Image (cartoon, rainbow, N blue to C red):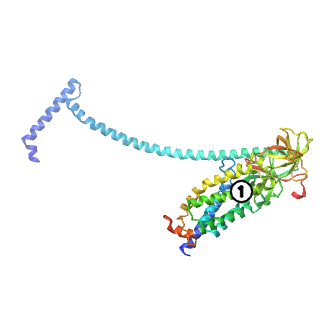
Amino acid sequence: MRFFFRSRRFKIILAIVLASALSFGIFGIATGLSAPQSNIMGAVLKPIQQGCANISNWFDSVFVNFESNQKLSQENQELKKQLADKNYQLVEYEDVVRQNKFYKDFLEIKENNPSYKFSPAMVIARDTTDPYGTFTINKGILDGVSVYDPVITADGLVGYISDAYSNQSVVMTVLNPSINITALDNRTRDSGNITGDADLAVKGMCKMTYLAKSSSLAAGDFIISSGAGGVFPAGQIIGTVKEVKTSANATDYYAVVQPSVDVFDIADVMVVTSFEGKSSISK
Amino acid sequence: MTTQHKHKYLRFIGYSLLLLVCFIVQTVPFMIKIGNAYPNPMLILTIIIAMYEGDKIGTGFGLASGILMDLVSVNGSGFHAITYMLTGLACGLLVEILVQNNIISAFVLGIATLGVNSVLEWLFKSLFSGLSINLYFSVYFPSAIYSLAILIPAYLLFSKIFGFKIRYKPPSGLPWGKLSHKSVGVRKRDY
């Protein structure tokens, strides 16, 4: 190594470097342009520098995105939680609105009939093998419900309790041929008997039988319960008359009645556990 | 407890849970219906269990499913308990002594039992109010067809869930017994 620094080769190289540096410096000062060696080096190094800069920027962006993704993800989780809470509140609100409407309708009935005692109930099951709309409610003997208790909605009479268990009861509807409700035409006060019919039940209708030949029922008349017998309270809307027909034996008439309540589509009902005029058979 | 017993008890627990699920699905207020037709998963399950397990177990599960159905029926009369029990008994006996346990038998037994049950229900519901043919063809017949349509997929799914292989018919001295042993592709039941 020592010999290299003393050799002629080293001295020549040193002389060339010094001469180049001096000349390029004077060139730069005199002309104001960048030195040629800088241009040459720049041209050679530029692609490499650009590549390195791109790589550096990419890494930079990755870390920045990672950081902002984490923040965004956190924010997203918080917003989702807030949205879930709001949805839950909305469901509760809708439930309260529905219950409010339900109780408001019954308040009117209660105000008109102060002697009624109600037990609200929900439909929990249906007998799918039964074409008459028989359903089960979530109230039973322990809730004060008993057999023959009438079941109503704000729209009218639905039927009565046919079987009462401890915590649930089965409701027989007005479409069932086994039901018999003494009824009146609200306009003409003609009396008859509401009962179900197998043919009419398929169309969701029932019939009013034992109409006298002198009766003047017409389509559109409201049929209400008469209260006779003490099983059903008086004045409950049962349905509207669709048409009046002659019975098969041609001795009397019967009216096809469209119930005011769609028994296949109800979700909430009220069981009337007590009312003025209730008979002992249903107590 | 032997493995055979353990499998048996596990199967029965599975059947019981399936029975409860079918009951809830059948009686839920807004079940999928086509027109006036509802399927009858309880009866289908009774048929399938009776085919796989025999007459005694079939009778028991038929009785249990019928009692559950009577809980939601008017007058809780026991009608469903009797008819479903007899369905389980009939299907179990037929598979024991007369037919093989396969898809074709399931289909034929389904036609017979669903048909007979639909007629019995129609008679029971409308006998005292005037028999109405319209009621039968509007409600009960379409319901039987609907139930039949889901019987085969239910049968196959049941065999997959409980790991059954096709059951062979035991020799009973009847001509059918010899024929079944010569059948191709029929394997022993795996306990």
Residue B142 image position (x, y, % from top left): 67, 50
Q: Is residue B87 left or right of residue A211?
A: left
Q: Can residue B5 be spotted in the picture?
A: yes
Query: Is the C terminus of chain A in the top left, top right, bottom left or bottom right quadrant?
Result: bottom right
- Label 1 is placed on what type of residue? Val
Mark 1 falls on what kind of element?
A: helix
Residue A140 image position (x, y, % from top left): 78, 58
Q: Quadrant of residue B159?
A: bottom right
Give above or below for A162 relative to B35: below
Q: Nearer the viewer, residue A281 or B80?
A: B80
Q: Is residue A3 left or right of residue A119?
A: left
Q: Which residue is mark 1?
A: B119
The outermost residue toward the top is A31
Give above or below for B164 relative to A131: below
The outermost residue toward the right is A214
Q: Nearer the viewer, residue A89 or B94?
A: B94
Q: Residues within 10 Å of mark 1 (few under 14, many from 20)?
A: some
